Image (cartoon, grey):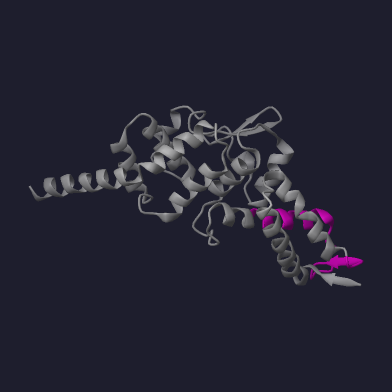
Amino acid sequence: ETAYFHELKPLIEERIKEKLEQFWNEGISGADFFISAIGPAIEIFGRYARVEKLSGERVEIKELLKFIRKTVSEYALSKILKNPQLGSIDTETRFYILWRWTFNSAKVIFDDARLLSQALGLELSDYWGKGSFIKKEKEFIQVLGPKERGRDFLSKEKYENMVDVLHKALIYWKDEKRDKVAKLLTSTGHLENPHFWQVAQGISEVLPEDNEEKRLLQGFIYGRETYYKKANSQRFIQLKMFGE
């Protein structure tokens, strides 16, 4: 029997998420989480002798795996961030969160890194060597934390993703420059952006206990009220100067 892929997708997605909920509750995470979703998807896909697109072209297993990775990525992100609405989280930040959850700080062979990035629609070659948190070293890909990136990126004035803002804020926090943290978060609109704080908290929770980035994140998050107070103080000074 032949089936159409667009009709199977909702059934596969439902079956995957049903199993993922079980796997999540059992503490399965990272690469194992992605692998564990393949069986449930094959249960449905494998019922048919042939699965086609509307064009009549056969859907190969490679395309099924791509759909599985995308579904698992979205599910994992919603769990990590404790928020099913991911529309306000940029692609680079989603990649960063999933990388930390899947690989932590490890160097990963390019093909494995590419599979994760493709699930999110991110092209790795667009980022490495350009002041990004993505670094290519021979056949390996590494995702850099705030300290590993050095200080050059601190001169950035334009931010294309939450990770750059978060990393800059963490460096300022480490240097005990709370005023700069408040100014940065205010100017980028993230001081009162709940999604930004969900990202910071989510990354912190997936990192291991002895991780330096986790320690920085925990301290940064703990000081949240301080940034509000400093931002309000900065606004008061500006209003006073303007009034004068």
Examine the structure image and report whether residue 103 is included in the region drawn in magenta. no
In the rendered image, the residue lying farthest to the left is 244
**Of 93 and 23, the residue lying toward us:** 23
Residue placed at 71% from the left, 67% from the top? Answer: 14
Q: Is residue 111 left or right of residue 210?
A: right
For the N terminus, the quadrant is bottom right
**Where in the figure is residue 66, as x and y percent of width and height?**
74, 54
Residue placed at 53% from the left, 53% from the top? Answer: 81
Q: Is residue 213 above or below residue 46?
A: above
**Where in the figure is residue 196, as x and y percent of width and height?**
44, 50
**Where in the figure is residue 241, as x and y percent of width and height?**
12, 45
**Where in the figure is residue 136, as x and y percent of width and height?**
63, 31
Q: Which residues are magenta?
A: 47-73
Q: Is residue 164 above or below residue 197?
A: above
Q: So how many labels did they put on this image?
A: 0
Q: Quadrant of residue 152?
A: top left
Q: Quadrant of residue 68?
A: bottom right
Examine the structure image and report whether residue 64 is included in the region drawn in magenta. yes
Q: Is residue 161 visible?
A: no
Q: Is residue 159 left or right of residue 24?
A: left
**Of 111 and 75, the residue lying toward us:** 75
**Of 133 and 201, the residue lying toward us:** 201
Q: Is residue 65 visible?
A: yes
